[in-house]
Amino acid sequence: MENPFEIINNRLERIEKLLENIYSDMQENRGNPTSPKIMNLKQLANYLSISTSNIYKLTGSRNIPHSKNGKKLYFEKSILDAWFLKNTIMTNDDLEQEALKYTLKRKFKRR
């Protein structure tokens, strides 16, 4: 028969290992908090740091992608992130390259 103190000691060691694993997982995820995939109006206001009335204006003018279920507005984070990237402003170098491409493609006409 095994000593009861050894059984307790073995169990405590397993519990300590589990706690260490949980703690290390929490430390890894600390810098990368998971955000919800679908946000409501208040969550979006916090995410964008703008007022809810401004969000209502954007949805009313159909300038921001959203879903509506009854009276509630919902926003999908991945679609909003793609929408933000679509609305990026080109730098002066990018504009010059686009203008150069346009002028090279364009056929010159003599008058």
Image: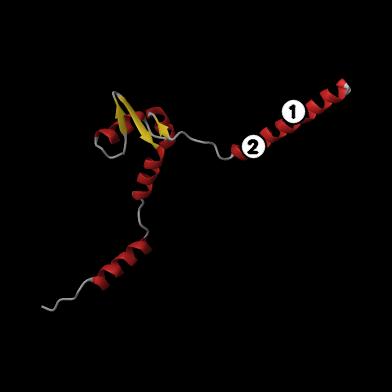
Marked residue nearer the N-terminal end (2 or 1) = 1
Point out the residue furthest to the front here.
1
Amino acid under label 1? Answer: Ile
Residue matched to label 2: 25
Asked if 93 appears above or below 62 in the picture, the reply is below
Residue lying furthest bottom in this view? 110
Q: How many numbered discs, if any? A: 2
Q: Looking at the picture, how far across and down is residue 37, in whole percent?
A: 43, 35
Q: Residues within 10 Å of mark 1 (few under 14, many from 20)?
A: few
Q: Can you give x and y, in whole percent of width and height, for residue 52 in the image?
A: 35, 29
Provide the secondary structure element on which disc 2 rests: helix
Residue occupied by mark 1: 15
Distance of mark 2 from mark 1, alpha carbons? 15 Å
> In the rendered view, does 33 fall on the left or right side of 60?
right
- Tag 2–tag 1 contact (CB < 8 Å): no
Q: Position of residue 79 (x, y in %)?
A: 37, 41
